[in-house]
Amino acid sequence: MIHVFYVPGMFGATIEYVLRDFTNELAPTNASISSDGSIQTFKRQNLPKNKSMLDNIRMGEISTPPYPFGDLHLPEILELYPFHADDHSILIYAESFQDAEQNILFQYHKISIGEANTGLKIFYGDQSNAKSDVGQWNQNYTEYSDLKPWEFREWFSLFYPSWIQEWQQSYNQVPDNWLKVSSHSVLHDTTNTFEKIIDFCNLTKKNSLDNFANQWKNAQEYILNEYKLINTIVDQTIKKQDYNWKLLHPVAEAMIQQKLRTHGFEIQCNNLDIFPTNSIDLYNLLDNQLQLHTQEIQL
């Protein structure tokens, strides 16, 4: 059996699609690239999303477990996972902080507002602590969705770096006989990476991957361009160079706030529900004398 462990957003469905539709041995999906660049239009063979689902993994061709899920981190999932001696196991991980930040944007566009359309709950994580966490902002809050836009932006800008650390550490948390594939290589060396995965699984390729790989890469470009825009906004703001952009979504705004913090600037963010769309306006909200946050808010 083949197992593909991946962080949500790091192309688990795409890899299952490639393994099934471009090899002779596995049952095809006959899926296609969707409007948001993902491949979510087919039934996954095994997609465990919580601890209880690990007991119901069907023997078959492939499983694609995301990590982490619920309150289980990767090492804990691995301890419970029903492996067999002849399985082929693959890990998709973040090679760099920048790759992981890009994946957060993939999560937003493909899971929050894309075909999956789950809203922002993927960013809230385990909601069992919601009341105590959001109560730090307002004692009347009970759910993460109670946070005002400026509060969500501030909270998430402090929190998401802890995700990134976990996505990078996973490389050292699986055995050396696994195939370890970075999300960067999937995005930027697509055909070779897909072929490496097929070979590792002892499958035989039945069709050329070139056309699909090019179409798929082009479908991801809008997210990579947004990440470039975020970095440009940060750079132009710090340099106080006049630069305009369209209104962004809250996850992108939180990323800008976090990046400015790494440069020593806090945003005067209290009640800033509408984020600036001009670098001079944003610069005027910066303050390097504010006490910098030294601890991330934990879920």
Image: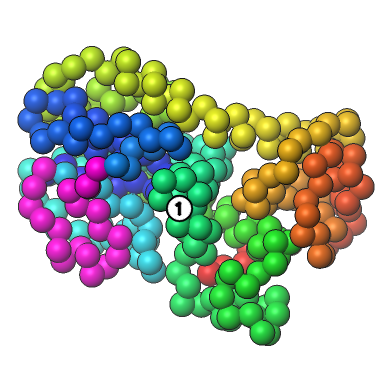
Q: Is residue 230 above or below residue 134?
A: above
Question: Which residue is at a point 39% across and 69% down the rendered structure image?
Answer: 71
Magenta-drawn stretch, dominant element (helix, strand or loop): loop
Q: Is residue 131 above or below residue 256?
A: below
Query: Which quadrant, please, contains the N terminus?
Result: top left
Q: Which residues are magenta?
A: 42-61
Q: Is residue 96 visible?
A: no
Q: Position of residue 103 (x, y in %)?
A: 49, 42
Name which residue type carries label 1.
Answer: Asn
Front in this rendered view, residue 80 or 2: 2
Colouring of the image: rainbow
- Residue 230 within the segment the image draws in magenta: no
Q: Is residue 255 left or right of residue 35?
A: right
Front in this rendered view, residue 207 or 125: 207
Which of the 4 image quarters holds residue 136? bottom right
Secondary structure at numbered mark 1:
loop
Mark 1 crowd level (few <14, some 14–19, many ≥20, 10 Å Cα): few
Q: Position of residue 288 (x, y in %)?
A: 87, 52
Q: Position of residue 58 (x, y in %)?
A: 10, 56
Question: Which residue is at a point 11% across and 43% down the rendered structure image?
Answer: 61
Front in this rendered view, residue 124 or 259: 124
Q: Position of residue 285 (x, y in %)?
A: 88, 51
Q: Is residue 63 left or right of residue 34?
A: left
Q: Is residue 32 above or below residue 1?
A: above
Residue wearing tag 1: 117
Question: Which residue is at a point 10% across and 34% down the rendered structure image?
Answer: 26
Q: How many marks?
A: 1
Question: Which residue is at a point 56% across and 75% down the rendered structure image?
Answer: 143
Q: Is residue 30 above or below residue 129?
A: above
